[in-house]
Image (tube, grey):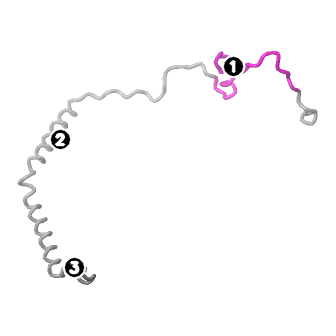
Amino acid sequence: MTSANNRSCYAISPNIESELFKLFVRKGDIHTRNWPQKWDWLLKEYAGLRDKTRKITERSILIPQKSATDPRRIAIPSSTNGYYGWLCTRPEFQLEKYGPDVKDYTIPEEYRSN
C-alpha cells in the first residue's frame, strides 16, 4: 500500500463535510426545540423552590451582628518594648538560662562611647 492510498482513506470530500455540518446544525435545532418539552418541569421546580425560599426569608428575623471590636481587656502594654518586658515576667519566656559559671564579657574599648 502506498502513502497516497493511506491519505485518500482519511480524506473527506467538501460536499460530504458540508452535509455532515448541516446534519449537526439540524440536530442542534431539533434538540433546542425539544428541550422545553423534556426539561420544563425542572424549571418549574426551581421556580417553586425560589418562591418557597423567598417566603421563608420574608418571615425570618434578622440576627444581630457581632461587634467588630473585642470587648475583653487583656493586660498587654501598648508599646512593643513593654510587650517584650511583659513577656519576660512569665517563666516560659525567661531567657536567663545561664548560671553564674558563665563569664560576663566586657565591651572592647573601641566600641565604648566616651
Q: Amino acid at mark 2?
A: Arg
Left or right position of 72 against 15: right
Between residue 72 and residue 17, name the one nearer to us: 17
Which is nearer the N-term, disc 3 or disc 1? Answer: 3
Q: Nearer the viewer, mark 1 or mark 2?
A: 1
Q: Residue at x 22, y 34 (%)?
A: 57
Q: Residue at x 65, y 15 (%)?
A: 91
Q: Residues within 10 Å of mark 3 (few under 14, many from 20)?
A: few
Task: Find residue 49 and report its horizontal and vertical position in percent.
Answer: 15, 39
Residue 64 occupies which quadrant of the picture? top left
Which is nearer the N-term, disc 1 or disc 2? Answer: 2
Q: Residue at x 31, y 27 (%)?
A: 63
How far apart, in angstroms, are the residues tagged by discs 2 and 3?
A: 53 Å
Q: Quadrant of the C terminus?
A: top right
Residue 80 occupies which quadrant of the picture? top right
- Name the residue beneath numbered marker 2: 50
